[in-house]
Image (cartoon, rainbow, N blue to C red):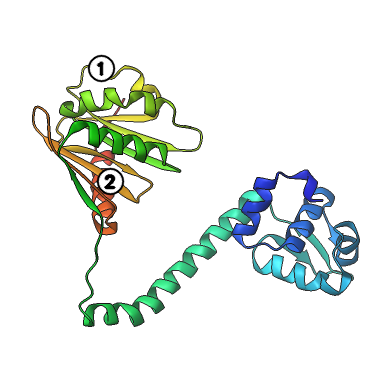
């Protein structure tokens, strides 16, 4: 049964938390529809001694449903629905982890006076800043947020070729431009673009894990990169606040 999906999809299903037997059972149900446990066992090559354990686990994880018949009948949820239930379940688990683990460990961290040592770099030269920006963009996996005031226009033009190589089908690109920028070529074709009348500095945030902040008036004078979690979160929250009140292109 696994031959009907790619190796990448099978790997993703395992990362989500499904076992080989669970993947086989779900794929069988996707193709065959309403089935008994014995039909699934035989069709998906799962030992009968394991089949109820597999099906009960799939039902708990939100990938299948069952009907109270004799014998009991099983059928699949849609992949979209199953993934959404998995996402919600994982979010609930993370909240529980945060509540329990942080309540025990954070006081120890604070009591012992441990101090973070985040990476914060201040760039003295434009070439170094450009190299770091290109590295950030090339490593992007899901999201790029760009706030571009006029003084950043030359910098964005330099990295435009890197931006054009981004897979926009997999990476969300939000571009907030200063309304006094005359032109940035094809930049407006790469992602969703909005404009603001006033922008006091700018920057680029990648995947919510690193940020390049650029400050200045007529030209960049302070260029700072960091992966400090709180700083990146602050920058992202501030970007989202400005984005919500920006004008659509």
Q: Which mark is residue 230?
A: none
Expressed as whole percent of the image width and height from the top left, the position of residue 24 reads 78, 57
Instruction: Give the side of residue 129 with respect to residue 144, left or right.
Output: left
Expressed as whole percent of the image width and height from the top left, the position of residue 44 reads 85, 58
Inter-mark Cα distance, 2 to 1 = 24 Å
Label 2 CA crowd tier, 10 Å (few <14, some 14–19, many 20+)? many
Expressed as whole percent of the image width and height from the top left, the position of residue 92 reads 48, 67
Q: Please identify the quadrant where the C terminus is shown.
A: top left
Label 1 CA crowd tier, 10 Å (few <14, some 14–19, many 20+)? few
Query: Which image quadrant is residue 198 in?
Result: top left
Q: Is residue 200 among what the camera can see? A: no
Q: Nearer the viewer, mark 2 or mark 1?
A: 2
Q: Is residue 235 among what the camera can see? A: yes
Residue at the image position 35 percent from the left and 50 percent from the top: 208
Eyeballing the image, is 204 above or below 64?
above
Residue at the image position 65 percent from the left and 46 percent from the top: 8
Decide which of 216, 74 is in the foreground and name it.
216
Query: Which image quadrant is residue 146 in?
Result: top left
Q: Mark 1 falls on what kind of element?
A: loop
Instruction: Give the side of residue 7 with respect to residue 154, left or right.
Output: right
Q: Mark 2 falls on what kind of element?
A: strand
Give the residue at mark 2.
211
Eyeballing the image, is 85 above or below 147?
below
Between disc 2 and disc 1, whose residue precedes?
1
Query: Which image quadrant is residue 139 in?
Result: top left
Residue at the image position 20 percent from the left and 37 percent from the top: 202
Expressed as whole percent of the image width and height from the top left, the position of residue 133 reads 30, 36
Give the residue at mark 1.
183
């Amino acid at each position: 049964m696994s031959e009907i999906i790619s190796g990448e999809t099978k790997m993703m299903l395992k990362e989500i938390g499904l076992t080989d037997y669970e993947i086989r059972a779900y794929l069988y149900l996707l193709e065959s529809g309403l089935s008994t446990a014995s039909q699934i066992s035989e069709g998906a090559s799962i030992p009968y001694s394991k089949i109820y354990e597999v099906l009960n686990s799939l039902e708990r994880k939100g990938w299948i449903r069952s009907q109270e018949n004799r014998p009991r009948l099983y059928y699949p949820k849609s992949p979209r629905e199953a993934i959404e239930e998995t996402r919600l379940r994982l979010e609930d688990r993370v909240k529980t982890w945060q509540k329990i683990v942080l309540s025990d460990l954070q006081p120890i961290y604070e009591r012992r006076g441990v101090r973070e040592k985040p990476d914060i770099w201040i760039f003295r030269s434009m070439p170094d800043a450009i190299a770091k920006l290109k590295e950030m963009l090339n490593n992007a996996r899901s999201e790029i947020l760009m706030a571009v005031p006029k003084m950043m226009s030359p910098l964005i033009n330099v990295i435009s070729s890197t931006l054009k190589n981004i897979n926009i089908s997999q990476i969300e690109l939000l571009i907030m431009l200063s309304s006094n920028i005359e032109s940035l070529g094809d930049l407006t074709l790469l992602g969703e673009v909005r404009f603001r009348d006033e922008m006091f500095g700018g920057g680029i945030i990648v995947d919510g894990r690193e940020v390049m902040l650029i400050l200045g008036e007529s030209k960049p004078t302070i260029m700072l990169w960091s992966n400090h979690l709180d700083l990146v979160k602050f920058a992202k929250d501030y970007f989202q606040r400005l984005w919500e009140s920006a004008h659509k292109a």
